[in-house]
Image (cartoon, grey):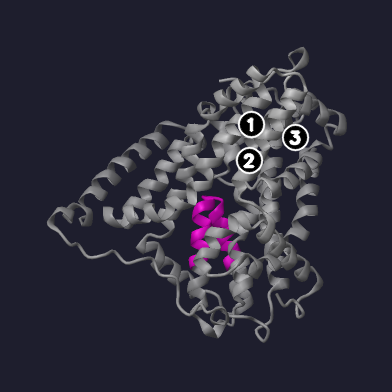
Amino acid sequence: MNTTNEGLMARMALRSAAWSERWFPDAWVFAALGVAIVAVAALGFGSTPVATVNAFGDGFWSLIPFTMQMAFVVIGGYVVATAPVVARFIDLLARVPKSGRGAICYVALVSMLASLLSWGFSLVFGGLLVRALARREELRMDYRAAGAAAYLGLGAVWAMGLSSSAAQLQANPASMPPGLLAITGVLPFTSTIFLWQSFVLTACLIAASLVVCWLTAPSERNARTARDFGVTEAAAVPALPPRTRPGEWLEYSPLLAVLIGLLGLGWLGHEFATKNAVTAIANLNTYNFLFLTVGLLLHWRPRSFLDAVARAVPSTAGVLIQFPLYGGIAALLTHAQGAGGVTLAHRLSQLFVHVASTDSFPAVMGAYSAILGFFVPSGGGKWLVEAPYVMQAANDLHVHLGWAVQVYNAAEALPNLINPFWMLPLLGVLGLKARDVVGYTFMQLLVHVPLVLGLLWLLGLTLAYVPPVMP
């Protein structure tokens, strides 16, 4: 790896990415290690072997509804992003930028705004937009910097939007582990992602990210284009194969897509007409139903829709196999009682109470979550591990519970900027390696860390504690 022509920070980032790609095991291994560590800790603090294994086994399947909901976030986002009509829309968007540096900032803005709707959609949509822009050779757009910009949706603000798994989980009592529900109650979106403080934080992160993109984008003379990486054509959504037998005619006819789509739109219309819009969209089932219905209609033919689903499913493997372990960890934390009937969650919450005050809690929790997130790249599932003790600490310190969720959301995105795990779907679209883009995302990290921690502390001072509300 030749880094002679790179700056100091870029060289550090490239070496960090190369090291992590070589030595970091699969994310499932970290989740499994988490199970082992928490189980040993529970035993060490006096939990009996029977109580420990029962807690793990009882919790293992406790998150199946939430696991499937998160898998459908990925599937729904991919299906919508790869619909033929969306591909044509991407081609139109690619005509807007007038310079290579402007194109990079443009990709960053589109990616971050899209991630507020769905992080799964943002990754694929951003990658396809970069590939479409790469065809415009007159832009002299640096392909690496543009790829990093497409990743900013997941690396900067995704958890502040509608697909935030922590905010979605807290708003849906049916998806929450019983031990967590007893600590936090139900937190609607108006207490988390729809706080005005959240809007301010999100706007600041978007603005800062765009400034960094502009300042770090190579000049046209030094730009490395897609052709330099062997990428010579725009990414193409696979064409629908021709029908080969009469029994396939319904798969190739829009009849069923229109019928089911109309039924879906009718139900969605009723939901939003009879409920507050914030309440309706906060329901994960409604959120996923919306994306699947729109995706089906945009693909128009069931065969096209099903092919898109098949291509999306491999991206859900990490969610499906990791989240049961998180459920087991959450149960070990909240149900395996040790000496004096005290759980690990209670002990950890007391530790937070000792090291933080009401005012400093957001910054302390944010730093802790960001560091842990580099080793457990969960896309939000880590919240199930942290929530029992950090939210109990928030109660004890009288910290606004909704803001504690937002502290986690903002800090959760920070390690994504340099962790290769969540880059993989985007890198597959771009035909790049993590080391090609992480030099630019590392520069974003250097700016985001002090900005996020500072804003979490400052904005947290404007919120008063509200006791948990039980369903």
Q: Are marks 1 and 2 in contact (CB under 8 Å)?
A: yes
Q: Looking at the picture, which amino acid does disc 1 mark?
A: Ile
The quadrant in which the N terminus is found is: bottom right
Residue occupying image coordinates x 64% and y 48%: 377
Badge 3 marks a residue whose secondary structure is loop
Q: Residues within 10 Å of mark 2 (few under 14, many from 20)?
A: many
**Residue at which label 2 appears:** 31
Asked whether residue 402 appears in the rendered view, the answer is: no
Distance, label 2 to label 3, CA atoms, is 34 Å
Is 121 within the magenta?
A: yes
| Quadrant of residue 139 within the rendered picture | bottom right
Residue 329 marker: 1
**N-terminal label among 3 and 1:** 1
The residue segment tinted magenta is: 107-128
> Between residues 103 and 141, which one lies in front from this camera angle?
141
Which of the two discs, 3 and 1, sits closer to the camera?
A: 1
**Residue at which label 3 appears:** 463
Distance, label 1 to label 2, CA atoms, is 9 Å
Q: How many marks?
A: 3
Badge 1 marks a residue whose secondary structure is helix
Residue 7 x/y as whole percent = 79, 74
Residue occupying image coordinates x 61% and y 55%: 421
Q: Looking at the picture, which amino acid does disc 2 mark?
A: Ala
